[in-house]
Structure formats: structure tokens, C-alpha cells
Amino acid sequence: MAVASSKNGVSSILTAGVIVAALGYFVDIYDLLLFGVVRKDSLSSMGYSPAEIEKYGLMLLNVQMIGMLIGGIFWGMLGDKKGRLSVLFGSIVIYSIANIGNGFVNDVTQYAILRFIAGFGLAGELGAGITLVSESLPTEKRGYGTMIVAAVGVSGAVFAGIISRTIGNWRACYFLGGALGLALLILRVSVYESGLFKDMLQKPVQRGNFFMLFRSRAIFLKYLRCILIGLPTWFAIGILVFFSPEFARKDLLNIDGKVVAGDAIMYSYAGITLGNVLCSWLSQYLHSRRQAVFWFLILTAIGFVLYFTAYGRSVTYFYIAMVITGIGTGFWAVIITNAAEQFGTNIRSTVATTVPNLIRGSLNVITPIYAALQAYFNKLVSAEILAVVIIVIPLVALYYTQETFTKDLNYIEEI
């Protein structure tokens, strides 16, 4: 039924808002994942040793994620107070300038400051885009709109991998990302504000108060479940993919061939791009966000098993395991859409912007636990233990999550 209703016009889905949100998320993901692609080359060119590269690489990733966590709260609240477009314009200016600055860094301190600023700016892009698209499209089509945003967006990581290999200069890669972001500002002039947001301005309601989410046990638990469901996504990227060259060493998985972080990210995000399309389509076909996410969590678990049992296998097999894991974690668009649909217009941007950034920021909790486990186990076993926990928790959270596929979004959250 959903498929039939959508054939009335691709043009009714490919609105200016959808196109601009998709291209914005493309630049967002390119800049966000570029650090993982050029991590080794950039730190090596500054004179750091292999041990320092691993140490500082994890530190810089965490700094970037802290920036995204703080930025997520700021941009989310701004989106509910001043409008979705204010975020789409403001965030892209900040992260574009910051990423140009990343091309000029000469030591890890400068790198950390600019990765924090870039992370802060990047935090606003996805949530504002998903909120705008969800509120602008008919109920039966909004899943297709967010699918396009996510599918085009996450392919930015593939583009980052291709550009890194083509240009071969990590500084130029950062300059390109900043330039793409600034160029996108021109297209954003054609986008209109959400009608639901403009209607809400006529009502005397509290808007964009992040702390509203903690005033009620029911509201807080609903919000927490939205975050917990997404835990496998950034565990897979932030640990298994970013540090795949380290896991591939002879003393761990003994992969036959050289594993390159940039290639791992590129192949994984090719899988994530496909996964976002498939999961979004499945949610439309089943008329259920929950069922689609369940099956993709199971696929993620299969990907984890293939990854951890790759001992002595070829580098091709190892990359295939990461592609399958990527497809499995391609439920990103569906869970962010679900988060936006769970809450009223007066807090929707705050939720849709903070949820993905808290999921990304969960890496700041996961990595210390991962490090602590290594006091008792090696890196591989520590990651395996975390993987089991990080699959079970989302399955439990999903079980208690409300289905939102047919939910009317024209309402106010009363707290």
C-alpha cells in the first residue's frame, strides 16, 4: 500500500527540503568520517609514533564526539525555539569553517580544538534535516523521505574514502569538505520552514527545553529507549571499523593482507548506505519501524560474528564482514525517524538532534569500558564481550518501544 501511494510522484517526495537535507547530511558524514580515513596519515605526518597515533587517534575521536554531544543539545533546542532552518544554516557554517581549519593543524592540541568545534557544528545537521522532512511530507511518505536523506548522506563516507585515495593529501581532503559545506549554503536559500513549526508558534507552549525530557519517568524512558536502540551503530564504526588495522594484527585476528582504515570505512559505509535503503523500504513494506529495526539488529549480530571469527582469513573476507555489519547497522534512518515521531512538535527537533548525537557520544562511555576490559582480556575478547552486550540492550529497548509508523505528528508534547 505504501509503495502504491508513493508512485503518484517521486517529485512529491523529492522536495527542496529533502534534497537539501540529503546533501547536507552527505557533507556532514564526509567531514565526520574523514578523520577516521586520514587519522593515521595526518598524525604520522606530524611526527607521532605508531603507539602515539593509536593513543591520540582515540583521544581525538572522543573529543569530536564530546563536541557532538554538546552541539546536539544546543542545536536541538535552537531548532525548537527558532526553527529547523536556523540549525541547517548555523551548523553548516561552523563545521565547514572548522574543517578548513583542520587542514592547517600542526600538532595534536590544535587538532583536538578543531575536531571539537567541527563536532559541535556537525551535531545539528541530521536531526534538523530529519525533523524538517518528517514534518513536511505526508504520513505514508515520510519514511521514503528520510530514507533518501540517510542513503545519500551516509554515502559521504564512501566519498571520503575515494577522495582520500584519489587526492592522497589529507589536508586537501579537509579543505574540500569545508568548501562543499559552504557551497551548500546557496542551495539552502530555497528551503522553507516546517509548517507544523510555524503553526506551533501561534500557541502558548514551552519549546525546546531539553530538561522537559527528564520531568516525567515515562517521557525519560521513551527518550532513553530511542538512544539505546542505536548503540550498535557507533560501536561498529568507532571500534570495529576505525581500529580494524589494529584488530587485523597477527597477535589478534591475523588477517592475511594489509587492512587500511580508509578502505574499511569506505566499504562499511557502502554497506550502511545499502542498509539504510533496505531498512527504510522494509519499514514501509511492513508498515512498522520496530519490525524493520529488529531484523536489522539480527543482521548486525551476524556481521559481528563474521568479524570476530575472521582469524587467518583474507583481507577481502574481513572487508566483506564489515560490509555485512554495515548493512545491519543501516537502520540509522529508521531509528532517527522513529525518535522524531515519538515526540511532539515543541520538543521534536531537540529529540531528533540529541538522539543521534547521544548515540555517537555513547562511544565516550564504550571506549573506557573497552579499555577497562583489557585489564583482564586482550583487545579482541574485550570487543567480543562488548558486542554481545551492545546487541542485547537494543533488543530489550526495542521491545518496549512504541510503533510510530502511522502516527500523526501534528501535536504538542504535554509534560
Image (tube, rainbow, N blue to C red):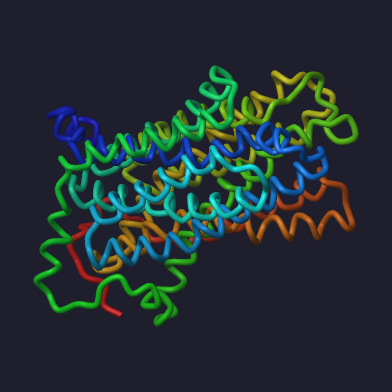
The foreground one among 151 and 54 is 54
Count of numbered labels shown in the rendering: 0
* Residue 58 relative to residue 144: left or right: right
* Residue in view at x 22 percent, y 36 percent: 187
Question: As drawn, is 121 to the left or to the right of 345?
Answer: right
Q: Residue at x 48, y 26 (%)?
A: 159
257 w.r.t. 78: above or below: above
Which part of the image, by quadrant, shows the N terminus?
Answer: top left
Percent coordinates x, y for residue 66 in the rendering: 56, 60
Residue at 17% x, 43% y: name it. 191
In the foreground, 218 or 163: 163
The quarter of the picture where the C terminus appears is: bottom left
- x and y percentages locating residue 133 in the rendered image: 25, 46
91 displayed left or right of 99: left
Quarter of the image holding residue 250?
top right
Q: Where is residue 399 in the image (x, y as percent from the top left)?
A: 49, 58
